[in-house]
Image (cartoon, coloured by chain):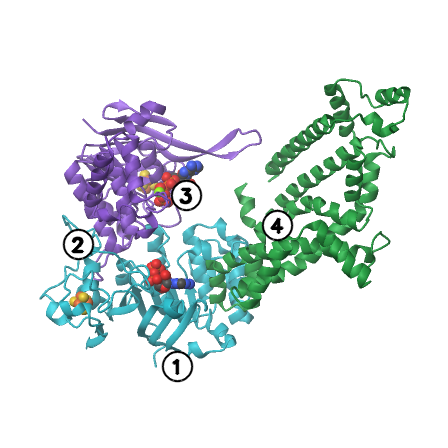
Amino acid sequence: MPLLEIKNLQVEFGSGAHAARAVDGVSLSLEAGKTLCLVGESGSGKSVTALSIAKLVPSPPARYVGGEILIEGRDVLKMSSRELRDIRGGLVSYVFQEPGASLNPVFRIGAQIKESLKYHRPAAANDTEVIRLLKLVGIPAPESRLRNYPHELSGGMQQRVMIAMALASQPKLLVADEPTTALDVTIQAQIIELLGDLRKQLGMAVLLITHNLGIVGDLADDVAVMYAGQIVEHGPVREVLQRPLHPYTQALIQSVPDLEAEVERLTAIPGTVPLLGSFPGGCRFHPRCPKAQASCSTQAPELASVKAGRRVRCPLWDSLLEPQTVSHRA
Amino acid sequence: MNLLEIQDLKVHFPVAQRLFGRTKEFVRAVDGVSFTIAPGETVGLVGESGCGKTTLGRAAIKLVEPTSGRIMFEGEDIAALSGKELRARRRRFQMIFQDPFGSLDPRRTVSEIIGEALDIHGLAPDASARRQRIDALLKDVGLDPSHASRLPHEFSGGQRQRIGIARAVAVEPKLIVCDEPVSALDVSVQAQIINLLQDLQREHGIAYLFVAHDLAVVKHISRRILVMYLGRIVESGEAKEVCRAPKHPYTQALLSAVPVVDPDSKRQRILLAGDVPSPIHPPGGCPFHPRCPVAEARCKTEVPPLRELGSGHWAACHLAT
Amino acid sequence: MLLRLGNRLFWSAVTLLGTAVLTFLLVNAVPGDVARVIAGPKASPEVIKAIHTKFHLDEPIWKRLGYHLNNLAHGDLGQSYVTEQPVAEAILTRLPTTAALSTLAIILWMFLAVPLGVLTAKYSGSWFDRFVLVMATLSLSLPAFWLARMLQYWLSYKMGWFPVAGFRGFSHLLLPAGTLALLFVGYYARLIHSNMTEVLNSPYVRAARAKGAPETVVLFRHGLRNAMIPVVTILAMDVAGLLGGVMFTENVFALPGIGTLAVQSVFNLDVPVIMGTVMFSAVLVVAANLMVDVLYQWIDPRIKSAA
Ligand SMILES: Nc1ncnc2c1ncn2[C@@H]1O[C@H](COP(=O)(O)OP(=O)(O)OP(=O)(O)O)[C@@H](O)[C@H]1O
Ligand SMILES: Nc1ncnc2c1ncn2[C@@H]1O[C@H](COP(=O)(O)OP(=O)(O)OP(=O)(O)O)[C@@H](O)[C@H]1O
Ligand code: SF4
Ligand code: SF4
Ligand SMILES: [Mg+2]
Ligand SMILES: [Mg+2]
């Protein structure tokens, strides 16, 4: 049994005529100890999917209109609020994009970490354990940091504190929603390295959300690409990045400038990312797809398994695949 | 002749006001920077958050008052100019901002926004010429001229950035300072904007000072690169050279930290310890020494000067060769 | 920190001095001979003359301003023209009543406003939220004088639940304080509501939920403390500004507080008392400002290091 299994998840915002499905039929599974990356551009539904795992999208305005989220076989969407509190920060811990805004500005960081311990490992809710956690995430002189307020730390340090807080409960799944997007490249490298180490050391599964394809290759076992609320491609990381099958994945990889390659002109994807509520009919990517056919604007493609471990939402993938697509510069 | 030549530019911001307004300390946002930009050339400026990129870019075109130094624009020192004299020259240097929404007046239509730039510099003799010019500009930046009467919020992020570009290009500048113009955009749209900037450069011979923290983007668009750390330039040179054989340990770390899509990439990451120090109390000696993986004793005391190590390739490090 | 406080104290002193000069000039610009007010319309010219000399009324205005400021600096607010009681004494004897009335009112309205604000933010858009919104708007638009009169009429005369007027103990404060509280509770409920709504959408509240914190802890520990940061400033300002509301309430309920003193002094053209009460409220405003500063340090740790 996988640690996490999401089946046909559907999340809507608004109601009646204004209802818009931000997540539309997402299915994913994650084995214990593995790392899955969820990539896609802004508004594609990555955060809503990730937050849904512990039912953290506030409802209202969100409505979980369909699907199941099974953690160790139990459906989160059917849990009582008491059970949810045990899952949140217990079995499943979160790290968010803006560490500065995700720490409560009026409490000391020691107290904030201790709070997590109190909920999930009350016996260990003491300074010694907090210091051990801070040391684990590489904060120098942790004893002297306990009484700091969040604003007294740099962005990188704040993110380390967030990670320490997430690890407090010894979770089986760590969900990191763009943990490095707000940080400088050199600090980003530190945090990615740290996450990679911790994952091995503690054997937890990681769901990493990012729009930076460069981070994917470093950490992931599998990767799922989202576009307009749906998964369009899913598979092992090396295969997806080196031989992308979906036209969107291909275009996305090509539009990233590469340090090691010399290109005169970047390959851009025309048009703009569609907004929630105005997703195009048929294949949602068809107005921007360089390979679109007439049928693409009318028939909504299914996410089909095309070979072992790979799923693609484009019926034409086979005929479109050029012999050696990749340019894995990308 | 160089289009722009910056000589020993300093911008210090006062901090910590005393009781009667006497200033005690300064943020040395830009601390003795020199560089040149040739006509039609793109110079990239990279560095970590807070190192002074925005301040340098703004000071170079006098949107921030420099504390000292010379700014030679087309052979004339504009550092000392102000008021009317400066305004008359503003037409020749423009700026594009990171947040395309914040820099566009939300209550004005696209044609008003672009038209204002034309009017300020008297570039539209009559209403119909103005109208035509605006249409042509919108077409140039890839927007539909029929959208001229819309408000900024009706556009996506990438389209807003196009409006900002149209406004800058409208007055036919020689230099545009681009302050992180693609950092807020989606990856797929980022490439569109970079291509557009390159097209405009080819057509109109505009020079860019292109500020970004993404080295891959900067390398792609720039002919030369300046690497900044704590208000100073620590390395500069041909973009390809700097990326192929970086001389300064900071540039080496920065390059190694850029994420690469290819999972088989063999690059070894150099992890820097610690954070960027405060520009109020920069470390003595080499400002990079507390984080430098190869620092020596003298790095703590001796400030390394910028030395030319290859043709046009400069670095400020005692050990660089 | 000390620097900041020193800075604050300096500007407080400047504010008070400015107020003193301004009120003096304004009050003395009012037409009407003060000596007539003091001695009555039938007083002989000799008496008037004597009064003029006694209060320096014949001397040029800048000289009188000098005397006035000098006296103020020595804590001397002068004497009432009417009762000849020292103004400072008049204010001090009435202070406890006014202070008790105000404190009780603040406690009442905050005890109501905090839960209302928090719960309406939590259940935003529900019927409960809408009902509170309507009531709050109503409370905001009530004229103070009218409300005081109505409550007095219905609850005291008709129902006999409260004493009608006068001051002979705590029970006499309840209705006036309740009246004041009603005038402010709506505003504060909405203020806390809007701050709380913002805070509840913040990443750190989401992070608190993601930790597994119970909803009450999320609301009252993580949320409320942050939501109260801006409220504290406004509350301190209102404590100072409360004197306006107090004036009406004290008069309607005939409470011997500073409000009644101020109103009487205006009717009597009792210049020293007018100036005294104005100075008193200025001191209150300045003190409130200082208090906000100190409170802020405690409630918002980010302030300390910014200084
Ligand atoms: N609380 C909310 N109310 C209304 N709409 C919402 C809410 N939260 C998310 N959405 C919408 O749901 C869609 C998916 O949002 P989501 O945050 O999952 O995107 P994302 O892929 O994480 O993008 P980003 O890269 O910008 O974080 C978006 O269109 C967003 O506007
Ligand atoms: N007007 C100002 N007053 C005081 N300090 C300032 C001012 N503007 C910038 N600074 C400081 O100067 C330093 C350099 O800032 P600047 O915005 O130039 O950095 P940057 O490299 O553009 O950073 P980022 O990548 O975050 O945009 C920072 O420490 C900043 O806090
Ligand atoms: S279905 Fe058609 S439009 Fe959609 S990705 Fe495939 S080819 Fe492109
Ligand atoms: S001068 Fe010394 S500290 Fe500075 S970069 Fe070179 S080796 Fe490192
Ligand atoms: Mg997101
Ligand atoms: Mg900047």
Q: Which mark is residue A73?
A: 1
Report the residue marked by disc 2: A267
Task: Name the quadrant of the N terminus of chain A.
Answer: bottom left
Identify the colour of chain A in the image. Answer: cyan
Q: How many other residues sit within 10 Å of disc 1, few (<14), some (14-19) or many (≥20)? A: few
Task: Name the quadrant of the C terminus of chain A.
Answer: bottom left
Report the residue marked by disc 4: C232
Is residue A52 or residue A38 the one in the foreground?
A: A52
Identify the colour of chain C in the image. Answer: green
Residue type highlighted by circle 4: Val
Identify the colour of chain B in the image. Answer: purple
**Element at badge 2?**
loop
Chain of the residue under label 1: A
**Element at badge 3?**
loop
Give percent across and percent down for residue A290.
Answer: 15, 61
Of callouts 2 and 1, the N-terminal one = 1
Please tell me whether mark 2 or mark 1 is closer to you in this view.
Answer: 2
Residue at mark 1 to residue at mark 3: CA–CA distance: 48 Å
Give percent across and percent down for residue A307.
Answer: 18, 76
Residue type highlighted by circle 1: Gly
Please tell me whether mark 3 or mark 2 is closer to you in this view.
Answer: 2
Give percent across and percent down for residue C201.
Answer: 47, 59
Chain of the residue under label 3: B
Please tell me whether mark 3 or mark 4 is closer to you in this view.
Answer: 4
Quadrant in the rendering for residue B219: top left
